[in-house]
Amino acid sequence: MLTLSDITALRMERQFLSNPSNKDTYDSLFANMSPVPTIYWCEPGSPPTLPMHTAFDDYAYNSTRRARRDILKGRFAGGSIAYVTKEDLELYACLYKKELTSFSFIQSEIMDLLTHEGPMNIGLMKETTGLLVKEITPALHKLQEAFLVYEDQLDNEGDRGWYLFESEFSEVDLNRYTKIEALELAIPRFAHLCVFFEEGMIKSYYKLPLKLVNEVITNLISNNVLQAVTVEGISGYVLCEDYESLNYGGATSMKPSILLLQRNDFLVKAYADELKLTFTSQWDTLYYLLIDGTFHGAVTGRFKFGPYIIEDIVLDLQEKDKNMRKEEIIKAVYGVFDSHESPIKRYNNKAMLCNSSSEL
């Protein structure tokens, strides 16, 4: 019998939230979570990382992979910067490319410059053309979304080279897949990680129209890839292979846990539309609280390049659970933040008795 508890336990396992990934399993996890953005608040030029999903320093690991061009930077979901593996560049380029039917004057100038002069940075483009940086940059972004130019982010430096996409990736066929075909390949990866999902989660994660999402889901059901199910009153979908194992396999156990997930986390992005409505605050959401595999709260405050300011921990738990798990929740928050540099000011809108972990 399908249960939400079994689904949640398997989801936590597959996303390596219950047992963080090592290097042997990391590459496939990264590929399934692609396109992978950098964490929500980080230094410009930082590589992508998967905090809470990994048991090692994937910042250093992905810095090396990026320098070797094993992972590649591009503009994908909604024009956002993210990374994909070299092997998946064609798939996600076909899914997200925004074709240009005509070039603006500045776009034509840039394409002509890169064609005849070779790769260059924005400063040299400005010097050569006389155009302003504020004119060049948005034109480059449009060309990047069309996968006509490539921004070579090999390290954390801001002086990045721009290339013609075709010259660097001649093996990539931007017309190999239609958007429907590309999404038909991407959704099973998402389904594997989430185990059970609703249409809105696909729309939220991939930033694609619901009409397209529904069409692809219908195709995948017809092709016996997905199975429509209702679990404890919630309608959604699972992989056909998971339907059998979850229906007829044994129950899966999961240890209680509290994790802080940053705003660009895979699971946060899948539930982003719902989370924004559920956890509202006058302050910024710094992290979401995943409690026993389900989102039940948010750490709110202000981002800073320095110690963050934690104004409040917002929760939707029952009152008795808010009190019973208070110590555990605060401990989890201070596992990410320094208790002296970023003390918690409030717990569920109530002022903390003191501004450090000594309250515990």
Image (cartoon, rainbow, N blue to C red):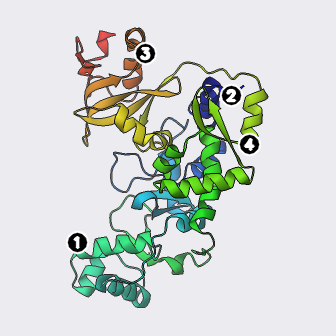
Sequence-earlier tag: 1 or 3: 1
Q: Identify the image quadrant of residue 128.
A: bottom left
Q: How many marks?
A: 4
The tag on residue 328 is: 3
Q: Residue farthest to the bottom?
A: 116
Q: CA distance from mark 1 to mark 2?
A: 54 Å
Q: List the residue tagged with mark 4.
A: 240
Relative vertical location of residue 61 with respect to residue 351 in this rendering, above or below: below
Q: Quadrant of the N terminus?
A: top right
Sequence-earlier tag: 4 or 2: 2
Query: Which residue is found at the position 33% from the left and 68% from the top?
Result: 159
Q: List the residue tagged with mark 2.
A: 2
Q: Residues within 10 Å of mark 2 (few under 14, many from 20)?
A: many
Q: CA distance from mark 3 to mark 2?
A: 30 Å
* Tag 4 secondary structure: helix
Query: Which residue is found at the position 42% from the left and 23% from the top?
Result: 332
Sequence-earlier tag: 3 or 4: 4
Q: List the residue tagged with mark 1.
A: 134
